[in-house]
Amino acid sequence: MRPCAAQVAAGWILPVVIIESLLDTDLYKLTMMQAVLHRFPAAEVAYELHCRTPGAMRDVPVERVREEVAHLCSLRFAPHELDYLRCLRYIKPDFVEILRLFHLQAEHVRIDKVDGELVITIHGPWLHTILFEVPILAIVSELYAQQRGDASSQAEGEARLEAKISAVQAFAGADHFRFAEFGTRRRFSRRWQQHVIARLAEALPRQLVGTSNVLFAMQQGLAPVGTMAHEFLQAAQALGPRLVDSQRYALEAWVQEYRGDLGIALSDVIGLEAFLRDFDLYFCKLFDGVRQDSGDPFAWGERMLEHYEAMRVDARAKTFVFSDGLDMAKAFALHRRFAGRVNTSFGIGTHLTNDMGFAAPGLVIKMTRCNGQAVAKISDDAGKTLCADEAYLAYLKKVFAVG
């Protein structure tokens, strides 16, 4: 099913090419890729698409996904994009030279329909496959939107966007409220995300601290935002010297790579309590803060504050980044709870880039293996725990003493 004429005319859903630049990705994919180049260049990995919305992928046309991924694999980083990356102080010259030669290779991706459901798997060297995740999710999300959206979607999306802007402007704590746009992976369309970011930057210049999308950050003069994702700590389960030390190993590798830049650690790869056992005084002082991506954010924040207090570290000098399925109302409530106790920032994704009057699917692509070994994410939300090997998942829980 192709988009209707009204959608195409409006320009919010593109009829042919969805990804036009390899820079149309989240910053943390590039920052992790640089660390992989320098520390794990021979690692082999596997990823799988997961949809948390039952049946949502049945209407996504598999041939269109294949066409878009084939186009994605034809792209190269443009000279002006490489020049932009060179200006980011944490991006190193040798990495930019690798990107100058880099392209994604279709042989690493398999796209099928199995029992009517879309199945996407990615296998190959970590260095050569790490950039597939975000654009493939954006492709699938936009093709889904072409099946669900209609001519009224733009008007509905505009109304909802303006309501969010008004809510921020009216919020009593607006002077100190800060958020970033995190919506690339589940956006309604590329042009819609671009429009949303531009409108937010225009209307909320003090509150919008940046975007995770590197292309739009470059185009609109915003800060690119992001550090690491779950896959970096998951891969350490296979790459580190001992499984029980895998989180410390990954965090240390990050510190050695970035030497004080990009200092937000991710707390929910093996659950918060296991993370806190590893996030000792050394890491508390080295990292600028921590990101919450599952579980009860209020309970998480209180527990993190207790941990900093136990480590005798002043949390008021640290930052909590909340990024788990946020809307503005929850972000406001979190800001009110923790204001004055810690710096807060909010990564808001689908609520900004795919709130068009129909439910957006819960799409993720997660690493399942590294160097032939199963790896897992044990989330603080049971529904987000992912592992392709139940025996390994049980062993991981035992090693880290988590339920």
Image: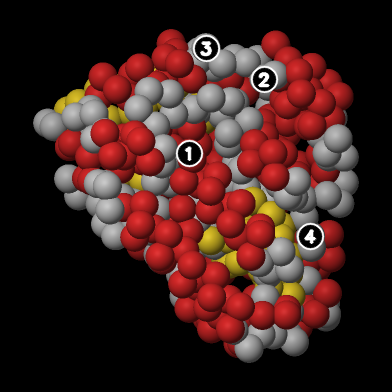
For discs 3 and 1, the disc positioned in front in the rendered view: 1
Give SS at disc 2.
loop
Q: Residue furthest left?
A: 115
How far, Cα to Cα, is label 2 from label 4?
31 Å
- Nearer the N terminus, badge 1 or badge 2? 2
Res. 74 mark: 3
Label 2 with label 4: CB-CB less than 8 Å: no
Image height of 243 relative to 103, above or below:
below
Label 3 with label 1: CB-CB less than 8 Å: no
**Which amino acid, by three-letter code, is at mark 1?**
Arg
Percent across and percent down for residue 287 are: 79, 60
Query: Dot 1, crowdedness within 10 Å: few (<14), some or many (≥20)?
Result: many
Location of the N terminus (image quadrant):
top left
Picture mark count: 4
Image height of 189 relative to 159, above or below:
above
For discs 1 and 2, the disc positioned in front in the rendered view: 1
- Which residue is depicted at the point 80% across and 80% down? 316
* Disc 4: which residue: 287
Image height of 64 relative to 224, above or below:
above
- Which residue is depicted at the point 50% across and 15% down? 73
Give the camera-side residue of 41 and 345.
345
Image height of 118 relative to 170, above or below:
above
How far, Cα to Cα, is label 4 from label 1?
33 Å
Query: Is residue 371 in view?
Result: no
* Disc 2: which residue: 77
**Which amino acid, by three-letter code, is at mark 3?**
Ser
- Nearer the N terminus, badge 4 or badge 1? 1
* Disc 1: which residue: 190
Give the camera-side residue of 316 and 161.
161
How far, Cα to Cα, is label 1 from label 2?
18 Å
Query: Dot 2, crowdedness within 10 Å: few (<14), some or many (≥20)?
Result: some
